[in-house]
Image (spheres, rainbow, N blue to C red):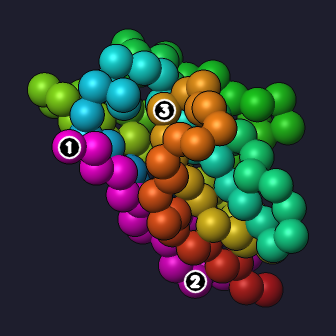
Amino acid sequence: QVQLAESGGGLVQVGGSLTLSCTASGEAFSLNPMGWWRQRTRDARELIAVATMNGSPNYVDSMKGRFTISREDAQNTVTLNLRIDNLQAEDTGVYYCNHWPTSKGDYWGRGTQVTVSS
């Protein structure tokens, strides 16, 4: 059974930090790289970072510097974290995790809302 759930979002002040967590169960996740995406209001979902199966991080160029992705695997379950430092207003949005790459029609979780206030 596929399970995918994000958590850890909330209301944070500018300059603060937050760690998001994702629990993903199933071979679709445990046998693939995993990524974090962000969707800001009216924008398309954008990729932030990907962790390979051995945990090596890869960041989209525009996202380098304030984001840290990490991955832990236990049996068929992946725990994927994303730490965001020095939060800015433009970080406000809904954050999602999933295997990478994704395909049209893939299941997505509900995401976790991050709101940064000034």
Residue at 76% x, 46% y is 46
Disc 3 vs disc 1: Cβ atoms closer than 8 Å? no
Q: From the viewer's perspective, is the residue at label 2 or at label 1 nearer?
A: 1
Q: Which residue is mark 2?
A: 11
Displayed quadrant of residue 92: bottom right
Residue at 52% x, 79% y is 10
Q: Residues within 10 Å of mark 1 (few under 14, many from 20)?
A: few
What numbered label is drawn on residue 1?
A: 1
Q: Which residue is mark 3?
A: 99
Image position, residue 62 (x, y; %):
85, 37
Q: Disc 1 on helix, strand or loop?
A: loop
Q: Which residues are magenta?
A: 1-18
State the residue in front, 62 or 1: 1
Comes first in the chain, label 2 or label 3:
2
Amino acid at dot 2: Leu
Is the residue 86 above or below the residue 118 in the image? above
Amino acid at dot 3: His
* Magenta span contains residue 15: yes
Residue at 86% x, 70% y is 42
